[in-house]
Amino acid sequence: MTDPIAAVRSAFPDAVRASAVYRQTPILTLQAADLLAVGRFLRDTPELGYDLLSDLTVVDRLRLPQAQDEARFAGIYQLRSVARGGDLLQLTVPLPGGDAPVAPSVTGLWPTADWHEREAFDLFGVRYEGHPDLRRILMPDDWPTHPLRKDQPLGGERVPYTNTWAEEEFQHLGKQIMQTDQRPEPVPGRMDARHMIVNMGPQHPATHGVLRLIVELDGERIIGIQPDIGYLHSGFEKQGENIRYKDFVYYTDRMDYVSAMQNNLAYCLAVEKLLGIEAPPRAQAIRVIVCELQRIASHLVWLATHTLDVGGTGLALLMYAFREREEILDLFEMVCGARLTTSYLRVGGVSHDLPPAFIPRLRDLLARLPGRFDEYERMLSGSPLWRGRLMGIGKITAAQAIAWGVTGPLLRGAGVPYDLRKAQPYCGYEQYDFSIPVQSEGDSYARYLVRMAEMRQSLRIIQQAVDALPAGHFWIDDPKIAPPARGLLDQSMEALIHHFKLFTEGFRPPPGQAYHGIEASKGEMGVFLVSDGSAHPYRCRVRTPSFVNLQVTELMAKGHLFSDLVTVIGTIDIVLGDVDR
Amino acid sequence: MGLETHLSNSGVVTTTLESMVNWSRKNSVWPLLFGLACCAIEMITTGSARHDIARFGSELFRGSPRQADLMIVAGRVSNKMAPVIKRLYDQMAEPKWVIAMGICASAGGPFNNYAIVQGVDKIIPVDVYVPGCPPRPEALLYALTQLQAKIGREHLTDHLVTPPILQLPPAPALPRLPE
């Protein structure tokens, strides 16, 4: 395996300002002027082949004591090589320009940088030179500030704890009606006003949430699409930087809210990487079980809504898929008491051990599910309506998918056997025997086949994990990270002190940074954390699969009929909480 | 006795217009097909087979605000989304009701930050608040029955749109007589 640091150092002796390997991830610090040349070298050299830009973000180092240079902002680029099994390389680029930073745009090298750079411009005010369409993406166009800068407050309202109805604050409740803005929308840039321009969303039954699409039509044919997102932007990253590490686990549920367990896992693994710890074997196996159950539940939601949009079965499959999903949610309720926003995983383990009744009930479900999947396939695979509306619609090639940073079933449906569970195993996935379903056609039907096969593979993994469930602790045995057992609190003063310290102060990871990506149900879900040694993350960045995958809507829908746009949105499988964060 | 004893023999029931209108309104509350965040998934679940919102006459989720009676605000309301919600509410025909589903729609929830409006009641009036993050489907069903009870107590005049009062120009001041 080629060492990327040595390769870059020998090819560009002057460009590298520093290099390090931190927690197994090679990190290169480059000058902004050399970013494009080095990026091209890293992408095009065959033995390096960093063709997938996983994540692009910015860190504002205004209050970071460990900053090694004077530049306030630094661009962070997470590169992966699909051909070399998802090998990760991090580029750190201090940005010149002080409070008005400027960076070269890498959209020419990795087209997926388009939305990432718009997001960095929106939230940090970094100006990317050479970006084709640099404007706000998440916040409203007239928003006054760049909210993720460190000199911007968290915002929000102070909540009074005691109040009476007589207070002035309540007098206007229900009466303070805002005037809606009546200005006509201007025609978006790059669109031709002589064509028909149709607005779809943010309230539309087929957009799966508050997505807005501006569609340019020639008759019924789609010429161009501009997604307008941010209607559910909730400031997760800023929120994460203002609370303690362990408290952000509860927020992660609410990003991709149909796969809460996997969000928890991505975050917990990133914190564990930062701390340099690993969860005990039993916790790892429990995590695998619940995350694979969550993958099935998430794919069932996709199947239900996709069939509802596209037609062929009417409401029937929605009812069937939600029936099975309810059984999975019942299992979640058994382990943690919640159905949807589970917050079951913790840094260093899981919050409770599996209850005794869980395993028999899970085995019962495992025995029944394959028959149910067969039933769905009997309803859909032979249906001329289903095949007619999916086959050949929303095609994407492997090269396009990688260039646009697309991961998950979309990439595997385009013929690339890339799955982080195999490529960069975590939680002991290397122990389980499963295959990566791949289809080469790259259309919506191929993705349907991939997702159906993935659900069966998940069943296989769960079966193996249940059969070989290790005994032992379900949470790491370190009182600095996991609270002591309840029984100990009555006997040991030390345990009581640990408990008190943990819940009042939290834990403090050493200064450093860590990125960890997992294979969530929709693609790579990654969390990037920068620690300054305090109990709060200095920078908390979440790379969500839906945000990246949604970028290819235009590519996939161009030239198709307007009605096929619904198929394309459905097949990408987005969750707007995951897109907007 | 009175008239009703004679009428009941011939299959006629007497009631007031108000209670008849309320009875029909409260048993066919059609929600707007519109979800924001996590709560929307539980809202869909409420419509699916196990919980079956059709038992309460509210299974017809309408895609157009013109056909909907009830807006279930299911999720957090961002600053970017708030004007859209306001417009959707304005587009619904009277009589209309609002359920704020979950803590985010009720009061901002865990997101007390720059992006989220601290409760949808800052922009539209709310009839029923449902606690929970997200509320279970049973909680939403309970909120719906509470709303039905509220509709049952309404008066016909509650939803009358009062015509704008004709504003006459002020009468010219009379010249004061010399004393």
Image (tube, coloured by chain):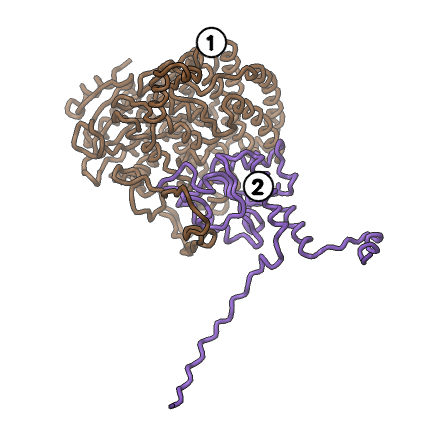
Q: Secondary structure under badge 2?
A: helix
Q: Residue at x 80, y 55 (%)?
A: B4
Q: Amino acid at mark 2?
A: Ala
- Is there any visible trace of residue A450 in the rendered image? no
Q: In the picture provided, is A13 more to the left or to the right than A420?
A: left
Q: Position of residue B129 (x, y in %)?
A: 52, 43
SS category of the residue bearing label 1: loop
Amino acid type for the residue under numbered disc 1: Ala
Labels 2 and 1 touching (C-beta < 8 A): no
Whole-number angstrom distance, CA of label 2 to CA of label 1: 44 Å
Protein chain holding label 1: A
Seen in the picture, residue B2 relative to A229 is either above or below; the reply is below
Q: Residue at x 32, y 43 (%)?
A: A135
Mark 1 closeness class: few <14, some 14–19, many ≥20 residues within 10 Å: few
Disc 2 marks which residue? B143
Find residue B158 and report its horizontal and vertical position in percent: 58, 57
Q: Is residue A164 above or below residue A97?
A: below
Q: Is residue A494 visible?
A: yes
Front residue of this view, candidates A11 and A441? A11
Look at chain B in the picture and name its colour.
purple
Mark 1 lies on residue: A471
Relative to A488, is A561 on the left or the right?
A: right
- Residue at the image position 47 percent from the left and 21 percent from the top: A291
Q: Residues within 10 Å of mark 2 (few under 14, many from 20)?
A: many
Q: Quadrant of residue A57?
A: top left
Q: Colour of chain A?
A: brown
Where's residue B59, x and y in %? 62, 41
Q: In the displayed structure, would residue B13 be above or below residue A215?
A: below
Image position of B81 with respect to A533: above or below:
below
Q: Which quadrant: the C terminus of chain A?
A: top left
